[in-house]
Image (cartoon, rainbow, N blue to C red):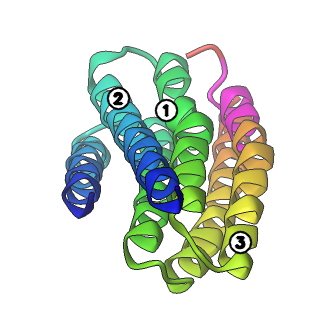
Amino acid sequence: MSDVLDNVLDVVSMILFVAGALLALVASVALHRFTGTRSRMHATTKPATLGVSLCAIGSMLQLSDVSNITKVVVIIVLQLVTAPIGAHMFGRSVGGK
Amino acid sequence: MKAVEAVALAIFVLAALIAVIRIVRRSTLGDRAVAFDLLTAIMTCALLVAAARSDDGLPLDLALLLGLIGFLTAITVARFIESRAGEEQ
């Protein structure tokens, strides 16, 4: 039973990792394709929150130590709090461009 | 399963290279800062995958540090761009 659960968790976390990786790839391609700083920011803020969250949840399923899982939770919270603040500051500083 | 993690890491490397090309090539300061922001997010993701791959706590500490440094950099550069735009007017 535990074996089956381990395999399911493995598959789920691999799907999350690959999804996060593809999100990062799409965002970096969008840096070249989009015009204007603000539309580029629109693309890059997705992996900063969703991509990091996907990878973090995926690695939480793989990690065995409780202290490491706690660190991952702290990383998720930090990213979810700081990414919008940084994006807001950028959006204000680049003006209407 | 290790193979899938390696594929994910390879995709992260490719994405980081594309973002670095954006930073190096001729572009405005704001664009470079946005690309750097993306680069730190990609590195955080890659460190999380590396932590899962080795079941080790060290990459997680690095990811936490990178998140803090990336935030401070974003704030500082944004304030710099803002103050420079204010001086020009």
* Mark 1 surroundings: few (<14), some (14-19) or many (≥20) residues within 10 A: many
Q: Is residue B8 above or below residue A43?
A: below
Residue type at mark 2?
Answer: Leu
Say if mark 3 contacts mark 2, CB within 8 Å. Answer: no
- Residue A44: which numbered mark, if any? 1
- Residue B45: which numbered mark, if any? none
**Is residue B40 among what the camera can see?**
no
> Would residue A87 be counted in the magenta stretch?
yes
The answer to which of A2 and B83 lies nearer the viewer is A2
Residue at 37 percent across and 47 percent down: it is A14
Residue marked by disc 2: A31
Q: Position of residue A42 (x, y in %)?
A: 55, 21
Residues in magenta?
A: A86-95
- Residue A71: which numbered mark, if any? 3
Q: Are marks 2 and 1 on the same chain?
A: yes
Q: Are marks 3 and 2 on the same chain?
A: yes
Q: Position of residue A97 (x, y in %)?
A: 55, 16
Identify the secondary structure beneath mark 3.
Answer: helix
For the residues marked 2 and 1, what is the alpha-carbon distance in whole angstroms?
Answer: 8 Å
The answer to which of B48 and B18 lies nearer the viewer is B48
Residue A66, located in which quarter of the rendered image?
Answer: bottom right
Residue type at mark 1?
Answer: Thr
Which of the two labelled residues, at mark 3 and mark 1, occupies the earlier sequence position?
Answer: 1
Residue type at mark 3?
Answer: Lys
Which of the two labelled residues, at mark 2 and mark 1, occupies the earlier sequence position?
Answer: 2
> Would residue B66 be counted in the magenta stretch?
no
* Mark 3 surroundings: few (<14), some (14-19) or many (≥20) residues within 10 A: some
Q: Are marks 3 and 1 on the same chain?
A: yes
